[in-house]
Image: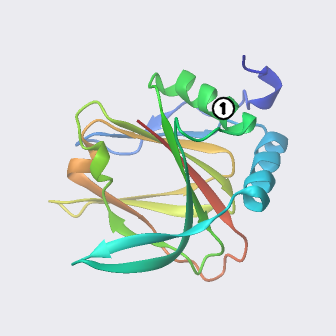
Amino acid sequence: MLCPTLFDTTHTIPRNLISHGGEAIYHAKIFEESFADHVYEKLLHEVDWRPDEWVIYNKEYLTRRKVYWYSKRRAWPQELLIMKEKVEALTGARYTNVLLNLYESGEVGLGWHADKESRSENASIASVSLGAERRFDLRHNDTGEKVSIILEHGSLLEMKGDLQHFWKHHVPKAKKILHPRINLTFRT
């Protein structure tokens, strides 16, 4: 059951950042600062972070971004279950997995990409940001139109519909940012 004191009740009305080709709905801060701080510190220090692995043309590469998966097969910390319940209440979607991403500083970014497992019309990925605020960019595949937003500590961005088919997204490097950011992407 949700504990109402854990959630920010002053966040702004959710808004769609794009006008066509799916939805990118920004909910701003949905978690109280103290709860977001607690979860951030717990994950930063207790998760067994691993470098992300990419295979390109049968060659394996390790990235500077670190990751960790929670799924049905791995017990979730209570704090993640609380976050999942809040995110599901706001998005109306149900999530079975969460990919945790650690960007140790602004020196670590993520290149332009689309999430392949989420290209169905009704797919939803709910992205919660903790820690350092970072810029998040979307770019339309055909028109080149770009949209940028600063993702706040404790905020939620939902990417849904056919957004992954028409848009790519990335987190650019920002050398002036010295503190870590943890991104939780709830998925099905």
The amino acid type, in three-letter code, at marker 1 is Leu
Residue drawn at the location 58% of the way across and 81% of the way down: 107
Horizontal and vertical percent position of residue 6 = 79, 30
Horizontal and vertical percent position of residue 126 = 48, 40
Name the residue at the front extreme.
73
Q: Viewed as shown, does residue 49 lie left or right of 168?
A: right
Q: Viewed as shown, does residue 128 lie left or right of 113?
A: right
Colour scheme:
rainbow
- Quarter holding residue 100: bottom right
Callout 1 secondary element: helix
Horizontal and vertical percent position of residue 79 = 74, 37
**50 is higher (above) or lower (below) than 96:** below
- Quarter holding residue 22: top left
Residue drawn at the location 71% of the way across and 77% of the way down: 178
**21 is higher (above) or lower (below) than 53:** above
Residue 11 showing in the rendered view: no
Report the number of discs.
1
Question: Which one is in front, 103 or 74?
Answer: 74
Residue drawn at the location 37% of the way across and 71% of the way down: 54
Q: Which residue is mark 1?
A: 81
**146 is higher (above) or lower (below) than 33:** below
Question: Which one is in front, 104 or 43?
Answer: 43
Q: Viewed as shown, does residue 39 lie left or right of 89?
A: right
Residue drawn at the location 60% of the way across and 32% of the way down: 84
Mark 1, Cα crowd under 10 Å, few <14 / some 14-19 / many 20+, is some
Horizontal and vertical percent position of residue 155 = 62, 44
